[in-house]
Amino acid sequence: MVEDKGNVIVLFKLLRHMHNDWPEYLKLFRKELGIKEMSLSQELLEKQPKATDFEESMAAIYKIQVVYDLDASNMTRGILNGKSYNVKNWGADECLIMGLLNQLMKHYDLSEQWFRLALIYFRGHPRPKELDIKLFKLSNILELLVEANKGLGHYSKARQYANELLSLQPNHNYINNQLLKLNDLDKKPPKSTKSNEKMYQLQKAICTKEYPKISLEEKFKLSKKINLRHYPNFLTKNETEALKMVSRPQLNRDENLSWNCSCKIAELKGSEHEIVNIINKKIRDISGVGKNVNEVIEVINYGISGNYNPDDREMSKRDHKANVLIFLNNVKQGGETVFPSLNIKLKPRMGTMLLWLNSEKRVWHHQCPLIVGNMWMATKRLY
Ligand SMILES: *[C@@H]1O[C@H](CO)[C@@H](O)[C@H](O)[C@H]1NC(C)=O
Ligand SMILES: *[C@@H]1O[C@H](CO)[C@@H](O)[C@H](O)[C@H]1NC(C)=O
Ligand SMILES: *[C@@H]1O[C@H](CO)[C@@H](O)[C@H](O)[C@H]1NC(C)=O
Ligand SMILES: *[C@@H]1O[C@H](CO)[C@@H](O)[C@H](O)[C@H]1NC(C)=O
């Protein structure tokens, strides 16, 4: 694929930064490759980010793009799902990186889109020669487009790109060989081109569905029959901050993938933290449920693309009486709470508490992938 693997990996390391904030991430990529970026890479190298960080970053971008059907071209202009962020556009470099991420995962439909954009930006660059001294040359983009189209089974398109590349570099051995193969494939395409299994279909189904556009009051009237209660301003800003603060040292990635939560969780006990005691008491007073039996509050932190989408069919047992969910911050985009069985979708609002009873069946909630920012919430089970 791309000869200079070392440099690609250095760039992957930069992806870690996307966990701060998507717009920040876009800005970061705008930094000119040069002394500044080299020293940044050095800094990151010293921090020895784990391989999983890169995989997660890649998976994060891929997840949001797939779940929300984000248009690659709009992403390059800082438009995410219809919302515009004031950031400098991505150029050929960034599109190439995105293409590579997808190509590595054999998601050729997306990689082809990104490489095509890279080509457009490359050609639109006022001084394309400058791009040549960066990581990639025009020939690299064309080579990757050959590979992506081949992966998609678009053999004649792949041949077009191969021929274009050969017009620049007639002695390109690899592409000459590819062209021979492509000619054969074009004449006799393989019967079944195995398409990549679509991922994140559950998230997509739940998070992009149209939910009734009615007021919050209306929603909660409708939900009376299942007893979903809603308490705005249940916690003050200070209380949410205090809870976040004590949870920070205890946050751990949710390693139990069976929960399908891509998030970090801290289990806090009332006996260890006064703020947890205070909140436990507030919950008891207002709900009348859970007579001091369960002192634990879980604080959950979601980064970009973080989500919780359990498969309701697999775990529909009722194991506790009621659930509490408290939003600890407002969220810029994504991260809505969905109750599929109630046809209700809610935007997180700092300090608001939701409380619902699991009567005959357990009522499941989902958290849609976060698009921008960071999301905090607290949950509690009442037995
Ligand atoms: C790109 O964003 C614009 C502005 O939000 C929107 O009107 C357009 O439909 C988007 N394009 C695609 C292909 O999603
Ligand atoms: C909230 O916290 C700030 C700083 O910690 C403090 O100065 C302020 O008095 C607190 N407000 C309330 C209403 O407790
Ligand atoms: C992981 O989740 C499963 C299914 O909910 C649960 O039974 C199991 O105890 C959990 N394991 C750990 C280590 O938390
Ligand atoms: C987790 O998500 C996957 C994919 O959507 C699904 O197949 C699986 O059943 C889920 N597991 C649980 C325990 O919800």
Image: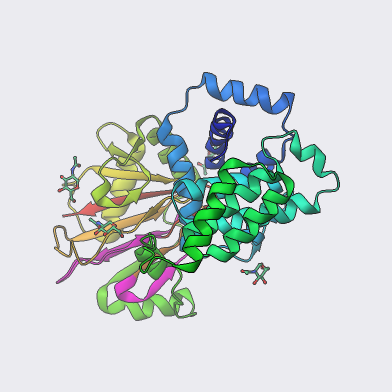
Residue 346 located within the stretch drawn in magenta: yes
The quadrant of the image that shows the C terminus is: bottom left
Residue located at (14% from left, 63% from top): 317
Q: Nearer the viewer, residue 2 or 281?
A: 2
Q: Which residues are magenta?
A: 340-367
Let me know if residue 98 appears in the view.
no
Let me know if residue 339 appears in the view.
yes
Q: Residue 32 in the image: x percent, y percent?
A: 74, 34
Q: Residue 159 in the image: x percent, y percent?
A: 60, 59
**Is residue 278 positioned above or below 181 on the image?**
above
- The residue most toward the top is 46
Res 11 quadrant in image: top right
Q: Nearer the viewer, residue 316 or 219?
A: 316
Residue 142 located within the stretch drawn in magenta: no
Q: Is residue 161 left or right of residue 329?
A: right
Residue located at (49% from left, 77% from top): 215
